[in-house]
Image: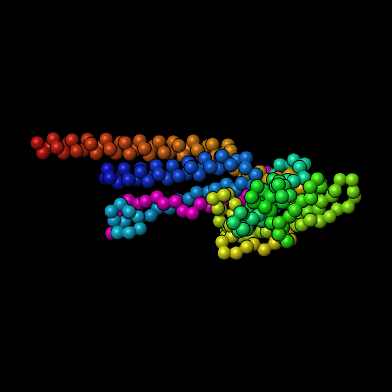
């Protein structure tokens, strides 16, 4: 009985620790543009021989708490107006396509663009934004305008002519197929998403994280208390085991 009690508390404490790590990561990214909240989920797995899950004979009195593949909350975040011509936000569903240093395409809602040293539109020094025809180069000193369909025009100061230098690759893949990578960008395993003309953008604004800091703080408090409760239960189980051992030794003397 004591073994079952301690084991249940141990798996509960482990799950609470993992949940706390996820919530802490969400809270840390509450100001990250376009960030999508990470959702953790757990399932009970029957314990099988020698204290290891999945293999062996089995122990019906105990289960092992196992974290499933983390999911993402794709609910849209608040739109922050900045009037910065390099900022862009997607209206409704959809993603910007970007390219990692290894050449692989990835997807993000982060629309705080920049122009790197080579004049290439990007979301980071080594992560250029993907256009329908490849990377998008912004001429030095020009004024940039982004149309609703993602077309990018530049205007040299002192002139009235607009020159289209590219068009953002806007996609809208099934979010159930997207996988979050370690760098926070999303991948579409085994394929690249096709451009979707229905995705629209607005210039001079960017989408904020969809993490609610207040809710994340409440979750952290609850998860911390749950961890403390489980660790106290383990301590109590150990004390009960010691007491039972003492009583058994006295009864035999």
In this rendering, position of residue 10 left or right of residue 95: left
When the figure is inspected, residue 145 is found, relative to residue 251, above or below; the finding is: below
**In the rendering, at what x and y percent does residue 155 appear?**
84, 49
* Residue extending farthest front: 118
Task: Locate residue 82, reporting x and y percent.
Answer: 74, 40
Front residue of this view, candidates 220 and 140? 140
| Quarter where residue 15 is shown | top left
Q: Position of residue 112 (x, y in %)?
A: 69, 45
Q: How is the image coloured?
A: rainbow
Residue name at image x 52 percent, y 40 percent: 24
Using residue 52 as the reference point, say whether residue 120 is left or right of it. Answer: right
**Res 165 quadrant in image:** bottom right
- In the image, residue 225 lies at what x, y percent? 44, 36
Is residue 51 toward the left or the right of residue 120 in the image?
Answer: left
> In the rendered image, which quarter contains the N terminus?
top left
The stretch in magenta equals 57-78
């Amino acid at each position: 009985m004591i073994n079952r009690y301690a084991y249940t508390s141990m798996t509960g404490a482990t799950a609470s620790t993992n949940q706390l790590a996820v919530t802490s990561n969400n809270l840390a990214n509450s100001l990250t543009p376009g960030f999508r909240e990470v959702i953790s989920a757990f399932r009970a797995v029957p314990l099988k021989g020698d204290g290891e899950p999945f293999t062996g004979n089995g122990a019906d009195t105990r289960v092992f708490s196992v974290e499933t593949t983390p999911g993402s909350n794709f609910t849209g975040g608040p739109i922050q107006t900045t009037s910065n011509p390099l900022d862009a936000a997607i209206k409704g569903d959809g993603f910007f396509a970007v390219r990692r240093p290894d050449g692989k395409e990835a997807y993000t809602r982060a629309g705080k663009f920049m122009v790197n040293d080579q004049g290439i539109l990007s979301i980071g020094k080594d992560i250029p934004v993907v256009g329908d025809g490849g990377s998008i180069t912004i001429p030095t000193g020009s004024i940039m305008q982004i149309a609703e369909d993602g077309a990018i025009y530049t205007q040299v100061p002192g002139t009235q002519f607009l020159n289209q230098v590219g068009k953002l690759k806007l996609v809208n893949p099934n979010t159930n197929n997207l996988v979050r990578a370690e760098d926070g960008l999303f991948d579409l395993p085994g394929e690249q998403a096709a451009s979707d003309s229905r995705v629209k953008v607005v210039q001079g604004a960017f989408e904020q994280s969809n993490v609610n800091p207040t809710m994340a703080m409440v979750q952290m408090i609850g998860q911390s208390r749950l961890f403390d409760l489980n660790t106290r239960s383990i301590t109590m189980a150990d004390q009960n085991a010691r007491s039972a051992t003492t009583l058994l030794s006295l009864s035999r003397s």
